[in-house]
Amino acid sequence: MVKKILTWGSVAFLIFFVAYRPDAAANVFKSLGGGLVDIAQGFGDFFTGLVS
């Protein structure tokens, strides 16, 4: 029950954030995407170093 409430609350907050602060929301998602790309690049470099 608590998990369902937290999930729906998070979805509602996300919709509110995107609707009322689209520039800030875009910056947050850009930062998260950049972080994921950096992590993937690090794993790629690690495995490249193992193979060569």
Image: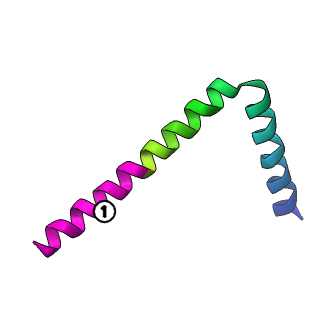
| Residue appearing at x 36%, y 49% in the figure | 38
Residue 28 is left or right of residue 11, and the answer is left
The rendered magenta stretch, by its main secondary structure, is classed as helix
Q: Residue at x 16, y 72 (%)?
A: 50
Q: Between residue 1 and residue 39, name the one nearer to us.
A: 39
Q: Kindly identify the amino acid type of the residue bearing the numbered disc 1.
A: Phe
Q: Position of residue 37 (x, y in %)?
A: 40, 50
- Residue at (30, 62) in percent of width and height: 43
Residue at figure coordinates x 52%, y 37% from the top left: 30
Q: Is residue 9 above or below residue 26?
A: below
**Residue 47 inside the magenta-drawn segment:** yes
Q: Which residues, given as a range, are shown in magenta?
A: 37-52
Q: Does the magenta run of residues contain 10?
A: no
- Colour scheme of this structure image? rainbow
Secondary structure under the numbered disc 1 in the rendered image = helix
Does residue 41 appear to the left or right of 47 in the view shown?
A: right
**How packed is label 1: few (under 14 Cα within 10 Å), some, or many (20 or more)?**
few
Q: Position of residue 18 (x, y in %)?
A: 74, 33
Q: Position of residue 20 (x, y in %)?
A: 78, 25
In the picture shown, does residue 50 fall above or below 6?
below
Residue 24 position by quadrant? top right
Name the one closer to the observer, 29 or 8: 29
The quadrant the N terminus occupies is bottom right
Image quadrant assignment for residue 28? top right
Q: Quadrant of the C terminus?
A: bottom left
User: For mark 1, what is the residue?
Assistant: 43
